Image (tube, helix red, strand yellow):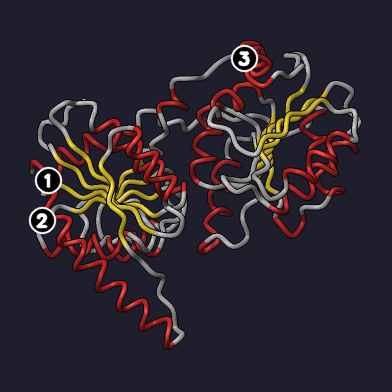
Amino acid sequence: MKTNKTKCLAIICGGTGGHFYPGLTVARVFQENNDCKACLFIGGHKVGNQVFDAKKFGVDVKEVKSAKISKHPIKLIVFILKFLHGYLYGKKLLKEFKPDAVLAMGSFTSVPISLSAVRMRIPLFLHDGNAKIGRANIFLSRWAKLVMTAFPPVNYNLLKCRHICTGMPLRPEILNAKLDKQEAIKELNREYSCSFTSEAFTILVFGGSQGAATINRVIPKTIPLLEAENLQVIHLIGKRDSKTAKSLYQSSSINHLVLECCDKMALLYSAADLAICRSGGSSIAELAFFEKPAILIPYPLAADLHQNDNANFYIKSGLAEIVFNKECTETKMKQVIDKFLTGAQHETKDFFFKKANAVDKIIDLISKEVAI
């Protein structure tokens, strides 16, 4: 990887994991060259953990204020004030950091500082982690040099500049920790004192960093209804539903591991035969990298229903089924899971869209464009 044309990179991302962790991954890889420096500008709610994670990897981080646009008169005034503050504060930060380029990872958080960069004639690049490019990136594309996407975008016609599908910047902890199932099960047993076996069909259930209420409510009730004899379940539940789910699993004879959170997702993916999850961009990219069958339950409140488009993208692999949130009942989930347990799911297609070198590709593209 060559980054000699770009020594200093500012990365703007929202506070949610889907925007932040790909941005942090780019920053980490960019700084692997000793003479290169990255800084993360993050905004949104509850960014404390993200600040800690960035500093843990030696990445400078600055918190910025942001607000969503609203038609409500009072909220609109608040939005305008915060937007102006973000724009002016962004100019201040950019003057201090003096980046050669700015990379915005999407979300409303990125707009004020991106416009500051445009005003200061700093080259602006965009990355979108979903199959449907978000409104912020569409708006900013009129000033950007290039839009890079995690997946082939369904609404590329709305962009005002060139776009290239680079893939999703997956964390090194994901890319470098892939195991075969037998090794993963052994490691899982050592790490969590389980009694899992590599012969059993293993289902991995998760709903994002905070869990997912529908998944957490339905799946623990569905699993005991399955007729499979050799079955085990790993469920990342979040804090809110942990107690209830644990009691439901304990009342069944299914071998299970219920965790509130886990920082060893590569281990869990490697151990799993089937995933049941939402269809956020990072989840879809990770499923593709690990080539995992999945039952996808798109988050119904995702902006512009972009998780539906992500799920439709992964359906092309032949490995996935979609169950919409309103259809997610014990009866429906049992029916769909049974198809995977009996091997009756769709035939796997020659699909795999890993794009495992996405980070290097993004950095190289920025470097080349800045040099032009």
The x and y percentages for residue 151 are 43, 44
Q: Which mark is residue 347?
A: none
Q: Secondary structure at mark 2?
A: helix
Neighbour tally class for label 2: few under 14, some 14-19, many 20 plus, Cα within 10 Å? few
Of the two numbered discs 3 and 1 on the same chain, state the one appearing first in sequence. Answer: 1
Gap in Å between the C-alphas at discs 3 and 2?
Answer: 48 Å
The x and y percentages for residue 44 are 41, 59
Residue nearest the observer in this picture, 251 or 197: 251
The x and y percentages for residue 178 are 52, 19
Which residue is rendered at x = 40% and y = 75% of the image?
A: 69
Which residue is rendered at x = 8% and y = 44% of the image?
A: 372
Q: How many marks overall?
A: 3
Q: Amino acid at mark 1?
A: Asp
Neighbour tally class for label 3: few under 14, some 14-19, many 20 plus, Cα within 10 Å? some
Q: Amino acid at mark 2?
A: Lys
Nearer to us: label 2 or label 1:
2
Q: Is residue 76 above or below residue 300?
A: below
Q: Secondary structure at mark 3?
A: helix
Which residue is rendered at x = 51% and y = 63% of the image?
A: 303
Nearer to us: label 3 or label 1:
3
Gap in Å between the C-alphas at discs 3 and 1?
Answer: 43 Å
Q: Which residue is mark 2?
A: 95
Q: Which residue is mark 3?
A: 187
The x and y percentages for residue 359 are 32, 33
Q: Horizontal placement of 244 versus 360: left or right?
A: right
Which residue is rendered at x = 55% and y = 16% of the image?
A: 179
Q: Are marks 3 and 2 in contact (CB under 8 Å)?
A: no
Q: Is residue 67 above or below residue 298?
A: below
Q: Which mark is residue 100?
A: 1
